[in-house]
Amino acid sequence: MNIIIIYQKKNLAVLQKGFAAIIQSKKYSTAFIDYNESKKMQPPDKNTIYYLDITGIQKAQVEKHIKKFNTNGQYFAVIDLKKSFQDIAWFFHNNACDYLNKDMLAKPLPETRMQAIMKAKGITPKTHTVRNYIIAKDSWKGIVPDNEYTFCFLFIEILDIGELKKHIGSEHLNQKIFSFRRYVEEMLHHVDGRCWMWMDVTGMFIFPFNGTTVPAIYYAIRLILNRLIISLEHTVFNQIIRYRIAMHIGNTIYQPRGKTGTIISDCINSLFHLGQKYTCEDGLFITEDVYSFLNEKTKKLFAKVKPFEGRQIYTFKYK
């Protein structure tokens, strides 16, 4: 079951405390979405309950949100920290699953509350891997080695290395690969990306996941669309280079670059498998975890392809 909390920024700490037990539970996948960003977001599927923080929102706007939930057939609940709406029954008459105020969130909500909601609404949880996002506060500033966090991962690999050696010469190849790597590093730095691993012609970049958006997707698209310009103007290859990209969102223990050899992560292994065994030619492939956080316009740029290792995969339609 997915629990998505649409929050007002000033209330985030209170809500994180109130949903602490739900976040830690392996039965639910939880994510916090800023109210101002919520219009861009879609739930992973309809197996989702939205908790909408209406604190400080005008009644007409609240009614508009609730109408949209009902139109889309989505489950929703209400958070009213200041008890600004007196007629609580109105929410339930309009299909709300739950109502919470500040007093109710003083202690972490028990899992039994979610179970009761699901039973009352006849929600049958799907049997799939639950995704519990571990969001680092203040992005990289809040990340501490040896702790687990959620990252967006970007795998990139230069192709046709044998052909490149024929044209360039192996003695100069490392320098040319370094120029490409440096360009990608500088580009992805704009969205908090860091080169975490680099082996020969294969790199892994990571971005602290904020629980709401995946800005790295637009830079990945640029890398695919601008291949000719990047090859001829921004590296020292002086010829067209081909590369493939795969992206995923998942959890891993963090260690600084250079100390990643001790990390055992199914998430990282899965992305390497996707990038090297599935991602063909010079394309951009993303998992359903990434796709679910794209806005509707961006989703239209991707096409569903066959699943891989139990995950639905999407490919960028650039041809």
Image (tube, rainbow, N blue to C red):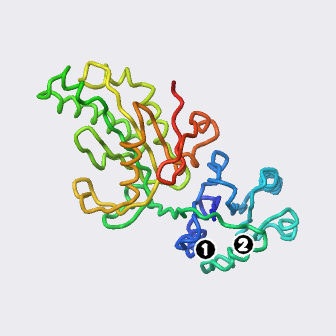
Q: Give x and y (percent) for residue 286.
A: 49, 43
* Residue type indicated by callout 2: Leu
Marker count (numbered): 2
Label 2 SS: strand
Q: In the shown orientation, is residue 217 left or right of residue 183?
A: right
Q: Quadrant of residue 53?
A: bottom right
Q: Are marks 2 and 1 in contact (CB under 8 Å)?
A: yes
Q: Examine the rendered structure and indicate whether residue 167 appears above or below residue 267.
A: above
Residue under label 1? 18
* Residue at image location 45% in from the left, 61% down from the top: 137
Q: Examine the rendered structure and indicate whether residue 238 appears above or below residue 192.
A: above
Q: Give x and y (percent) for residue 61.
A: 79, 52
* Residue type indicated by callout 1: Gly
* Residue at image location 42% in from the left, 62% down from the top: 149
Q: In the shown orientation, is residue 200 left or right of residue 216?
A: left
Q: Nearer the viewer, residue 278 or 183?
A: 278
Q: Nearer the viewer, residue 299 or 277?
A: 277
Residue under label 2? 100
Judge the density around disc 2: few (<14), some (14-19), many (≥20) Cα neighbours within 10 Å: some
Q: What is the quadrant of the N terminus in the image?
A: bottom right
Q: Give x and y (percent) for residue 223.
A: 41, 31
Q: Nearer the viewer, residue 70 or 34?
A: 70
Q: In the shown orientation, is residue 126 left or right of residue 213?
A: right
